[in-house]
Each structure stands twice: as structure tokens, then as C-alpha cells.
Image (cartoon, grey):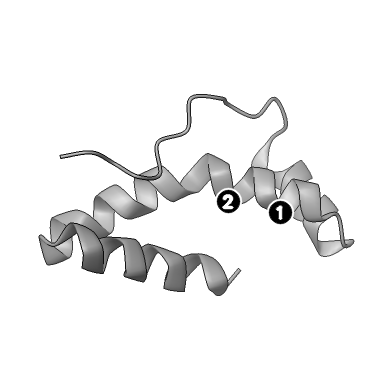
Amino acid sequence: MINPFTNSQQSEKSDEILISQAIEGDRKSLEELILKHQAWIYNIVLRMVFNPHDAEDMTQEVLIKL
């Protein structure tokens, strides 16, 4: 099974810095924060629903809440 949200690059900035910058309107920081966490959100959801398509949809729903 392939994780569609796998991200090979890791952020140098801490979550606290990224969140602060995103709150101030920095869209790049928000994107970086999403890329940093979407894979583990997807994996948690997949373990709950056992359906990759549903897990993708639910992951997007979680990330929209940001």
C-alpha cells in the first residue's frame, strides 16, 4: 500500500515557528506545516478506517481545519 502523502523533505523550522508565521499570513509556512504532518495524519486515519480512499478524504478534512 502506497502512502500518497509521503514527504521526503523535512522542515528545518519548529512547529511553533511555522504556526506563528502561518498565523501572520505566511502561506509558505502553512504549506510547510501541512507537508510536515500530513503523512502521519493519513497513517492514523488509515488505521481507523482501513480504506485508503476514505483515509485520503479524511486527511484532507483534518488539514482543512487548520
On the image, the x and y values in percent for residue 33 come to: 63, 47
Does the CB distance between marks 2 and 1 fall below 8 Å? yes
Q: Is residue 48 left or right of residue 22?
A: left
Measure the alpha-carbon separation of dots 2 and 1: 6 Å
Q: Is residue 62 left or right of residue 21?
A: left
Quarter of the rendering occupied by the N terminus: top left
Q: Residues within 10 Å of mark 2 (few under 14, many from 20)?
A: some
Q: Which residue is mark 2?
A: 34
On the image, the x and y values in percent for residue 51 come to: 13, 62
Up/down of 11 relative to 34, above or below: above
Residue positioned 10% across, 60% down in the render: 50
On the image, the x and y values in percent for residue 30 come to: 71, 54
Q: Is residue 25 left or right of residue 60?
A: right
Up/down of 4 relative to 47, above or below: above
Q: Which residue is mark 1?
A: 30
Q: Residues within 10 Å of mark 1 (few under 14, many from 20)?
A: some
At numbered mark 2, what does the secondary structure look like: helix, strand or loop? helix
